[in-house]
Amino acid sequence: MKKRILVTGATGYVGGLLLQQLDTQLYQVRALARYPQNLLSRLGKREVDVVQADVLDPISLEKALQGIDIAFYLIHSMAATQAFEKLEEQGAYHFARAAKKAGVQKIIYLGGLVAAETRLSAHMRSRCRVGEILASTGVAVCELRSSVIIGAGSLSYEMMKALVNKLPVMIAPQWIEKLVQPIYIQDVLLYLCEAMQLTWSGHLIIEIGGATQVSYKNFMLAYAAEKKLKRKIFTVPVLTPWLSSLWLGLVTPVYARIGRKLIQSIQHDSIVRSHAAREYFSIKPLGYQEALHKVIAEEKKQMIRRWYSAISSRGFVKKTFHADPKKRKKKSYEHMIDASPEKVYRYLQTLGGKNGWYGEWLWKLRGVIDLLCGGVGCRRLRLDATSLQVGDPVDFWRVIVMKENEQIVFKAEIKVPGEAFLTFYLKPSGHKTLLRMESIFDPQGLFGKLYWYLLLPFHEYIFKGLIHRIVKEAPSHK
């Protein structure tokens, strides 16, 4: 009988790649997702059972864990605006209790690698605490504590790549002299899969990393050498995590809220001190030079997974708009377009990223303000330049609804006193298309209402210009 496997964090970077790696001929695979529509659109024809559940909702976990033999716990709350440590502890506690009740045999957890004697950052302290909580109910837990993960689309790699590609000369904090053992993402997946075959009891902690150690500085210089770029890096004694996070947010895809936690976590060496991985596993991980070479080669292929494709822990609304329409603020724009709904729909999917919107300086200004407030900023991120799926990030928007040739809805992930949406509705009219674009805002309190009216003049300029751009360019779009 096939083993029944549950993957949490299935919309994230590692979880998404693990779903592709697991052989559905050998295992019955189930994926847990808070918002299944984001995951279903990416699975294609893979035989994966997707269940709706949230680790912060213990009742939903009962169905998700029913009949499961082995569970992968690949969840974190780095993007949370609330007290993320508390959220992570609550999620781990609910999951551990539900797993025990459901008779789960093993939990495999991917944590972070740090020395026990160091003063841990809040992020790394939370990662270790989650492992302890998962093991607290008696279910056998294998905790893989990983050094920096390197793969096309991984958080650490995308950050480093952006810094090296954009800055010929870098003034960097002293933490870039710290040692790490970068581990290739495919090696991480091999460890996760092989862990299913292990036999152990209690809480087994395994440190994993690549075959070689390197400082962050030399790792960046190694990437520059692979790309044939000349780069200089100078260190300074004082550069606070807050300033560093803003610097990362301006130059890389990492926004300040995550950047600050990331920087606090990498101010200590992240190297393997235990040889347990050699004793329990047959895997021989690559060194950082080999891993870099492979990742750069993989980037030439179309990748479908990036770290930022996971939905922010800030929340992904279940109801698209406010339950009370009277409280909703809305501004609509309509125009007839001399093109079919199919063509207009294809064109709408190219908005954002390098293609921009309209009134670019205003979008950039709003992104910088959000970045300074610890938000996502205007990240200029897209998974694909020509098409979208539910759950995709587009700058500071997230795609939450797609109805082919009929509707696309974006939700803003920037810090706003309420919930902001940008919607496009398409209606055929003979050989033409009636396009209705709506800017919708569900305000929170008096400040939310003031925010809407203060920005209304800017919205008039941006969205009127945007719809005229669509009218002009959509008919000639291929």
Image (cartoon, rainbow, N blue to C red):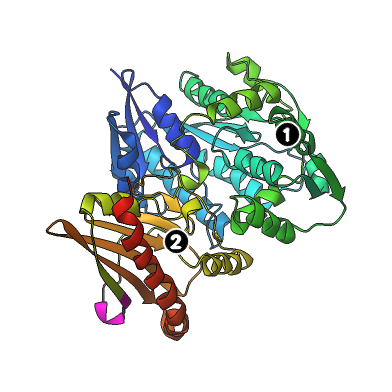
Residue placed at 42% from the left, 83% from the top?
A: 449
Residue 333 versus residue 269 in the image, above or below: below
Q: Quadrant of residue 157?
A: top right
Which of the two marks, 1 or 2, is nearer to us in this view? 2
Q: Is residue 89 left or right of residue 216?
A: left
Give the CA distance from mark 1 to mark 2: 32 Å
Q: Which residues are magenta?
A: 323-331
Where is residue 67 drawn, in percent x and y? 29, 32
Residue on which the image places disc 1: 224
Q: Earlier in the sequence, mark 1 or mark 2?
A: 1
**Residue on which the image places disc 2:** 357
Could you tell me if residue 53 is visible in this image?
A: yes
The quarter in which the C terminus is drawn is: top left
Q: Residue at the top extreme? A: 282
Taking the magenta stretch, the answer to whether it contains residue 328 is yes
Around disc 1, counting alpha carbons within 10 Å, would you say few (fewer than 14), some (14 to 19), or many (20 or more)? some
Q: Position of residue 6 (x, y in %)?
A: 37, 34
User: At 85% from the left edge and 57% from the top edge, which residue is drawn?
Assistant: 238
Residue 193 vertical position relative to residue 377 in the rendered view, above or below: above
Query: Mark 2: which secondary structure?
Result: loop
Residue 317 seen in the figure: no
Q: Which residue shows up at 71% across the image and 61% down it? A: 242
Residue at point 60%, 63% (across, down): 371
Q: Nearer the viewer, residue 423 or 90?
A: 423
Q: Is 347 situated left or right of 448 in this image?
A: left
Q: Is residue 19 magenta?
A: no
Rendering quarter of residue 461: bottom left
Quadrant in the rendering for residue 467: bottom left
